[in-house]
Amino acid sequence: MNKTVFLTRVGLLSAVSFVLMYVNFPLPPFPPWLKFDFGDVPAMIATFSLGPVAGVVVQLLKNILYFLFKGTATAGVGSVANFLAGVALVLPAGLIYRRYRSRSGALWGMSAGTLSLVVTMAAFNYYVLLPLFAALMDLPLEAFVEMAARTIPQITDLRTLVILGVTPYNLVKGLSVSLVTFLLYKHIARIFKLHTRQNMVE
Amino acid sequence: MLKGITIGQHYPGDSLLHNLEPRIKIAIITAYIVSLFLMQGPVGYLAMMVITLAAVFIGQLPLRLLLRGLRPLFFIIGFTLVLHILFTKGGTVWLQLGRFTIESQGVLTGSLMAWRLMLLVMTTSLLTLTTSPIALTDAIEGLLNPLKRIGVPAHELAMMMTIALRFIPTLLEEAEKIMRAQMARGADFESGSVLKRARAMIPLLVPLFISAFRRADDLALAMEARCYRGGEGRTRMKVVLIRLGDWISLASFIGLMVVLVWLGI
């Protein structure tokens, strides 16, 4: 693929990703600070149509733009977490699809991405994110656990907090992004393949 | 749904703060954040607040603009305060209801942390308020340039970010238009489960993506017609130089921070 086309397509997909990230919404069973958005969909499209590197770059640019525009209450920790989650979702999908270019390859890729998102974010929350937030707010970690235990009584320690509080959110997120990408891809694959061919003729 | 979104918060002006070189500005704000986390107590936070307010004054920014930037964060600030009041114990007991107590240490630490968060958000937003997004992108490219040697594509990243910045308003407007068109046909974007929302997104996303791809390919053609061939040997219309005054500002700010942290307040 032509390098300039790669740059402009990744740039535009990052812009779409940012726009979709802006339209976020809380989802009732989850606490209000875990918001849903479809900003990962353009990154997924990028990873399938332009390769895994493009997917990672879209995630990177989306988060830098969001950080610059929306400011931060967490000294950038939230943006780094979102970037990491995005890469965990998009990279395996892209790597698998590159090897197996078919509908089932895409489905396996997105399943692997969702699984990797869930596992990565559980580990990251447990070892880095929650301790870091606790340090940032000058709170003991137990405060988070006790707070969460008031809504979900099964939560008793940090491990159950991650399993019951973080994992379902990432699972729903991975699945919904995969679903939208799957429904979308067949509609738009035709168009950008056509465009590439036109460019080559020109 | 998309109403009331203002992209970017740049507040143009011609003050000392606006004219500071963006790379220097980023360095100064980083120094501020590091110092803020090294501060021990209320005296240090007071000093930092004076510095932030002085910067707001120098930049001739309306204070309400900064306060408006805090609004989305009321939740997390309040959350910090409540957690501290509930879980940090010590000092005198102010209120006792059965096993539940509010103690002075909790209220004190909670207020300090909420204060620190507010300073953090206000000061970082000073950067985006006084620097245009394009200038910021150039600054990021400048800061990444030394990393080119280890394979970081600084120019390409900055170019993609500039392209994204240029098209965000266009795409937002387009998304709004498509949304209205679909809503006029009875589409519902604002309710239902994830599954329902995901399905509802399709008629919005298909035209949005197609238009994005079309614009991208048109832009690539236009760039190549003008002989774009990457960052190698590329010159700029506006060259941003770090002047002596910028270095002096940076040095004196870092000096001030070192003194404040060293005082241990």
Image (cartoon, helix red, strand yellow):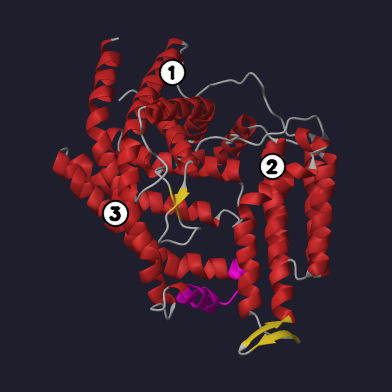
Question: Mark 1–mark 3 contact, CB under 8 Å?
Answer: no
Q: Residue B259 shows which numbered tag? A: none
Q: Which disc is residue B219 wearing? A: 1
Q: CA distance from mark 1 to mark 3?
A: 33 Å
> In what element is the residue under mark 3?
helix
Q: Secondary structure at mark 2?
A: helix
Q: Amino acid at mark 3?
A: Thr
How packed mark 2 is, by other alpha carbons closer than 10 Å (few <14, some 14-19, many 20 or more), is many
Q: Residue at x 66, y 76 (%)?
A: B85
Q: Is residue A183 magenta?
A: no
Chain of the residue on which disc 1 is drawn: B
**Label 1 is placed on what type of residue?**
Leu
Q: Residue at x 77, y 70 (%)?
A: B41
Residue identifier under label 3: A114
Q: Residue furthest bottom?
A: B98
Of marks 1 and 3, the one in the foreground: 3
Is residue B49 visible from the viewing direction of this image? yes
Counting from the top left corner in percent of width and height, residue B103 is at: 71, 83
Residue designated by label 2: B127
User: What is the chain letter for disc 2?
Assistant: B
Q: Are marks 1 and 3 on the same chain?
A: no
**Residue stretch rendered in magenta on the structure:** A135-150
Residue depicted at 67% across the width and 51% down the height: B70
Whether the residues at callouts 2 and 1 have beta carbons within 8 Å, the answer is no
* Residue kind at label 2, given as amino acid type: Leu
Element type at mark 1: helix
Which secondary structure class fits the magenta region best? Answer: helix
